[in-house]
Image (cartoon, coloured by chain):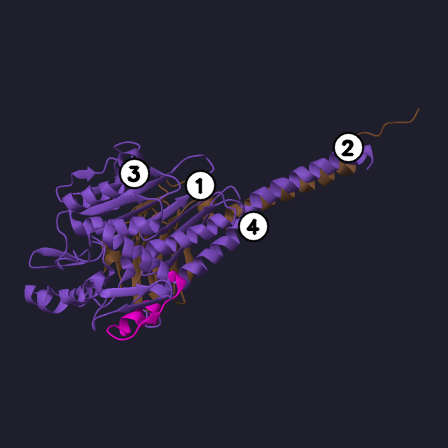
Chain colours: A brown, B purple
Amino acid sequence: MKDIPPPFRRGDFFFLGAMIGLAVFTWWCFLVADPGRATGPMILVHSNGRFGNRLFTFTTPGHEKRIRVEGPLGSSTLLIGADFVRFLSSPCPHKDCVRYGRLHRPGETAACVPNGILVQIVSGKENPLDGITR
Amino acid sequence: MSKSSIFPALATIAVLAFIIIHSTGDGAPLRRTVIMMDTVVEITVYGPRRLTVPALDKAVKEMKRLAAVLDRHSASSEVAALNADAGKADVKISPELLSVVKESDRLFRITEGYFDPTVAPVLDAYGFGRGDFRVLTDRELEERLLPLVGWEKFSFDPDHSTARLRKHGMMLDFGGIAKGMIVDRALAILKKSGAPAAIVNAGGDLATFGRKPSGGLFRIGIQDPDNASSVIDVLEVADCAVATSGDYERFFEADGKRWHHLVNPHTGRPSRNARSVTIVAPCAMLADAWATSVFAAGARKGLRLAEEAGIPAMILLPDRTRKSTSAFTRYLPSAETGKK
């Protein structure tokens, strides 16, 4: 009578282990590549100028930091706190961006349109609103 | 394949499927935020990345192309060319501009002239656009500016795709309709790609199609005119568009009054008996134009016009009370209020 081979050989376990390891590693890589998903909300700042796209973290409680962002009109300054970000100053004529005030929640966006600067709180968490009409 | 290799093969396929599903990010919507048309445009599209990435690129490209055609402040736009030839000969116009002109013509008539793209000379005289704001006197409005306003002084020929402003000094501004039209075009591209759902929001003029993967409707907050980071209500919508016009977006203050850009084309003065008007419509072009028109017409007349046209509308009055058409309330899931 012919022997039925076992479903798994020793080498198969090594192969399967390697594949699971690869899957976990890939998953981890994508979590890190999408920081909002892995580490909680972050601040995405985009400028049409040389600044490009950059991510910033919120500060620790009791601390604030200022970020200078160069746009086509000049420097805009952002103020970042433990749970907010806002435009502090901008060289635009109407200062709508400064007047907008603080952004707190993931998905919230403020922009200095004339100076081509966009600030957004990004996170993997679902925003309770899909859009704002204004 | 031998029996001994079936299980490892199946396990490998399962692991690879896991990697592919998680690495493509198909579970999460694709989002892009860009600055164009003097505003922030946010596009969110659901579905597999192989469909949504190229579709989103195409939609943004088309939006930029149309903005360049319809923006009167861009010297190379078709609208700028039409304005420059005011009082002269007919000008050949593109199918895109013709479609905006045709819709403007229809809206001018059904809104009793409260939607009128020829109000541009008045807006310019107030300083909207360049930022050199000033209050206009009654005399300059009556003698110099209002004679340049009136859609009936604009003619177009749909058969030959031509148009003409009949008086020198007249100007068109499709700001009250173009953004909506551009949003609709972008949404159509996303829909054609096979994506199951999307939302395109250009500075508050937004349109949606489909439902979110959870099966839920899109939840849209209406901005509080007095606090940019709060909403006064939340709408739940699907396969339709929402737009809001308010006195808090473009304005200056003088003589103790707020002078905003939502001007009544009949008087040349900003309409003062509303803070904001929110419209739900089948497409963003209509929502955009109706929001402008109802605001310009004022609370009572605006609401009547919207009711007669079957357009769901809600007006926030200066005392923060609300008035709405009968069709509007169905988009309100509750009396929800709160921060964004």
Q: Please report whichever mark, 4 or 1, sits nearer to the chain's N-terminal start.
A: 4
Residue A65 x %, y %: 32, 55
Circle 4 Cα neighbour tier, 10 Å, few/some/many (<14 / 14–19 / ≥20): few
Q: Quadrant of the N terminus of chain B?
A: top right
Tag 2 secondary structure: loop
Decide: marks 4, 3 in contact (CB < 8 A)? no
Q: Chain of mark 1?
A: B
- Say if B6 sits above or below B191 in the image: above
Q: Quickly name the residue at label 4.
A: B50
Looking at the picture, which amino acid does disc 1 mark?
Gly
Residue at label 2?
Answer: A8
Same subunit: marks 4 and 2: no
> Which amino acid type corresponds to the residue marked 4 in the rendered image?
Arg
Asked whether, in this view, residue B181 is left or right of residue A9, the answer is left
- Report the residue marked by disc 3: B234
Q: Secondary structure at mark 4?
A: helix
- Above or below for A126 versus B32: above
Q: Disc 3: which chain?
A: B
Q: In this orientation, which residue lies closer to the viewer: B267 or B200?
A: B267
